[in-house]
Amino acid sequence: MPLLELRGVSLAFGGLAVVSELDLHVDEGEIVSVIGPNGAGKTTLFNLITGIYRPQAGDILFDGRSIVGLEPHEICRRGISRTFQTLRLFLNMSVKENVMAAAYGHTRAGVFRSMLRTPGMRREEREIAALAQEKLAFFGGRLMGYRWDQPAYSLSYANRRRLEIARATATNARLLLLDEPAAGMNPAETHEITELIGKLRTEGGYTILVIEHDMHVVEGISDRVVALDHGVKIAEGSFDEVATNEKVVEAYLGLNTMASK
Amino acid sequence: MSDSTPHSSHIPAEGPAVGQDEWVARHAERRIMREGLLGTVEERLRLVPWWAWLVLFLAAFSLLPVFEHSGYVRRVAFDTVLYMLLALGLNVVVGWGGLLDLGYVAFYGIGAYAYAILDSTKFGYHLPTLVSVPLVVVIGAVAGLLLGLPSRRLSGDYLAIVTLFFLQLFQTITTNGDSAFGHDLTGGPNGILNVDPFHLFGHDLAVEHGGVFAVSYLYVALGFFAVVFVALRFVNESRTGRAWRSLREDPLAAEAMGMPVNWLKLMSFSFGAAVAALTGTLFAALNASVFPLTFYFVLLITVYTMVILGGAGSQAGVVAGALIIGPLLELLRDASKSRVIFFVTLVGALALASRRSRAMALVALSTLVLGFVVHAIAGAIHSDWVAGEHQPGFAGFADHWVVAPAHLASWITPTTYLGVIAAALLCTLLRGLPRLVALVPTLYLGAFVWENVMLAKPEPARFIVLGLILICLMILRPNGLLGERRVEIV
């Protein structure tokens, strides 16, 4: 049974079909890449899975159960977490607090227990802090030490992308949706992120669905590649199969541009 | 590691390279500190924990009645504690939740009215204070939830409109509540009178002792303040507080990270409302009466000013805001003190501006000279022109500086008023030397309007001075006195 399964999912904004009749599955422990030109519906796909949009047709199953109609925070608690293409950090909170905040869904100290600082609440706070340190330590020295107490806005662009991934993992998710994790990074950082995604699977045990434009990254990490164009799946398979697929080449470069001239 | 990398002087040449873990670990050595004693003091002060500051503050505040026997001053101190409580409550909604709640003072009113209904001769319930106060807090919290329900999907401007409507609704209901379904519930515009004082440990808390404001309410209010401050502080440092601030920063990301945004908004409203309602009980018990118009725009704007001036999001900040604005509004009632504050603000603003350019100092000097020259000329032409009465405070100086005619012709008030506004606007349009030249008569005209027109009407004038001070402070510190640095988009 796949961990995530989309069956005939469709969404239209007004008369514009953004995603139509999409079937997709991600198995446990797999890294699947979604590629496609701008406007192909990749980020919309993520918004559908995480419950920000509701599909007009079709079903989305996570771990065998339908998640259609659930609020985004409920879907997150089921075990799906994400990063955003346009970074959405809590900029005026500290690095550590950004990660600690994401533990909300799987912790339970209520407001009144917090006011009284009961022993149970304090124990939970220590656990959350330890969890945050563990998640930040995943990135080596990048997000360590004094940076924990720095506001997130003081981080460099690449570190912000790392912090978003750290925050996503702190929700205790099983499936990570990474929206262009290498966007805006230099070649060295891109290489680093490629290794990191592999490490997230081997050491973190996460299943990963990733949107990426950098074909070196896609080639480096993917077990399977899905190509979208105008909301329709045009190809699926290994990187080499998809990269040489006629429809994919056409979607990126246009139809017979050389021949028609 | 590249040994050829140039290092700045205070990092040893053999030190770790930028970006390495060791480099990060040794960040303390690279911190830029203030030089000398000031830096050491600053560093030490940073180590003092928040609760120590709170205890110090409470102790200092409690000692006030020991040194100050004036009932008026004690009363102002009590009102300031009420403002501090209101600011703490609003900080939950605005500073942490990031929700623009313009109906906030309605909850203060709900608390005051609820206490008045439960403990007065109007209905004759006379509940014990230890029952009615917690009950009123619960009523406030529930009212906050009820307002939150229709508003939870709104944000920004839309939320502001709905909450503003709620404040208006509260006004309408309390003002017309004397004939609600044939019953008198709120006393209408005449309010509810004969509200009971607090009754604690077998004693009625007296408001006055021999005509002087008694301090018991001040201590009760300080006690409430301490409890509210600590409780909210603890909530802020818990998962709920982090979720509130995440919601303020980015609601969509907060929702996607597993935080139930709608519920958190409701809680934030409810907490702010509960604190406001608690403050309302103090207000009603002390004044022994409640009227609808107490809980209206002027109070709303005053509390917002405190929160924004002090630094929304920082508890110490909003308390500082209340500590400054509360007494300031009182001082500005008195024309002589109000004049001192006006001129000190003006000179202070010029002094701050002149730190950047010597030209501003020259402007200040020129204005001074201009004043004495104009005064001398006016006095030489006709003695009536300078025969007007000056309020005390800076007396002697102002008498020879600002022209004050004995009789103001009716056209002078509107002309100079509009003139000073036009001149100030002109100054913002000009650049360089023309601006500096234009500033001199503008400042003098401003002083003239202040002395002759505004001091005659202290009530609107005090809010204008408050506005001036706010503008100056917001330019200097856009995030409030103790507010953290904020960024919207980077």
Image (tube, coloured by chain):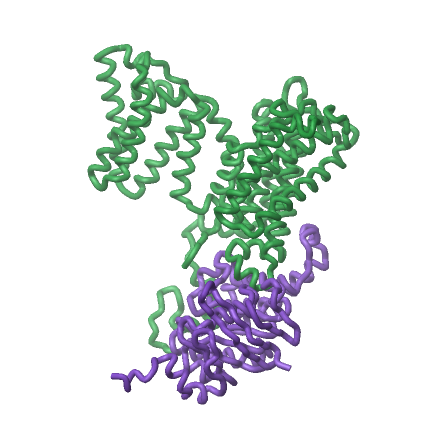
> Where on the picture, by quarter, is residue B106?
top right
The residue lying furthest to the right in this view is B202
| Vertical placement of residue A107 versus A201, above or below | above
> Where on the picture, by quarter, is residue B442?
top left
In green, which chain? B
| Vertical placement of residue A68 versus B348, above or below | below
Residue B46 coordinates in the image, percent (x, y): 52, 51
Quick check: can you spot residue B41?
A: no
Residue A203 coordinates in the image, percent (x, y): 58, 80
In purple, which chain? A
Q: Residue at x 22, y 34 (%)?
A: B437
Would residue B445 be found to the left or right of residue B299 on screen? left
Residue A199 coordinates in the image, percent (x, y): 54, 80
Q: Quadrant of the N terminus of chain B?
A: bottom left
Q: Residue at x 60, y 34 (%)?
A: B170
Q: Residue at x 54, y 43 (%)?
A: B162
> Where on the picture, by quarter, is residue B14?
bottom left
Q: Considering depth in this image, is B432 or B212 the residue closer to the camera?
A: B432
Residue A213 coordinates in the image, percent (x, y): 41, 76
Q: Residue at x 57, y 33 (%)?
A: B80
